[in-house]
Amino acid sequence: MEQRAWETHWHLHPGVRSGDQLTLGERAADRMRNPMGSWPFVFAFFAIMILWAIVNSVFYLGGAHGKHGFDPYPYILLNLFLSMLAGVQAAALLIAAKRADAISSEIAMHTETNTEDLKRLVTENTTLTEAVKKNTDLLEDLHRHVLALSSNAGD
């Protein structure tokens, strides 16, 4: 499976909620963040700006809409759209950043839980090992049992 540069795989992490576990807003933030923070988005944005300038200049030079084109220089309508886009994009980036923080927090909590479980298991293992060391009779019985099993396996 080919991976695009802007795709992430955090949703595969066992400690991160995904799919139906997410709210509508969280799913929207995930879908918006990945393509919006990518090179294809940036190149498409520049292409649209260049296309706007070229088409408007052709209309201006061709006189299809008088001597002004459909958006007279200095592209007032384009400036209005870019200003609106900047306002919406700032809010969208904050929403995406909040979602990224939530993902990081879920991964950290999962890691902390696993670390605590591992510490508990190591402590239990250490306690059992010390108990075996203290009881040499049990250790000798264990060695005999292991030897008996390995000799039976070789038959």
Image (cartoon, grey):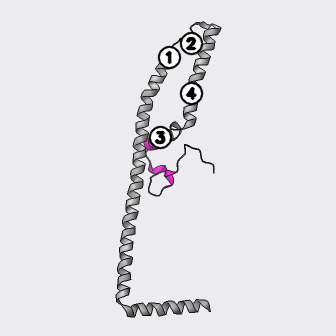
Residue 28: assigned label? 3
Point 54% across, 13% down: residue: 71
Amino acid on which disc 4 is placed: Phe
Which callout, 1 or 3, points at the residue further toward the start of the chain? Answer: 3
**In the rendered image, which residue does mark 2 sit on?**
70
Label 3's element?
helix
Whether residues under marks 1 and 3 lie with C-beta atoms below 8 angstroms apart, the answer is no
Which callout, 3 or 4, points at the residue further toward the start of the chain? Answer: 3
Residue 4: assigned label? none
Assess disc 2: are there few (<14), some (14-19) or many (≥20) residues with their C-alpha within 10 Å of its C-alpha.
Answer: some
**Which dot, 3 or 4, sits closer to the camera?**
4
Residue 7 quadrant: top right
Distance, label 1 to label 3, CA atoms, is: 28 Å
Which callout, 4 or 1, points at the residue further toward the start of the chain? Answer: 4
What count of labels does the image hold?
4
**Which dot, 4 or 1, sits closer to the camera?**
4
Q: Which residue range is magenta in the image? A: 8-26
Distance, label 2 to label 3, CA atoms, is: 34 Å
Whether residues under marks 2 and 1 lie with C-beta atoms below 8 angstroms apart, the answer is yes
Which callout, 2 or 4, points at the residue further toward the start of the chain? Answer: 4
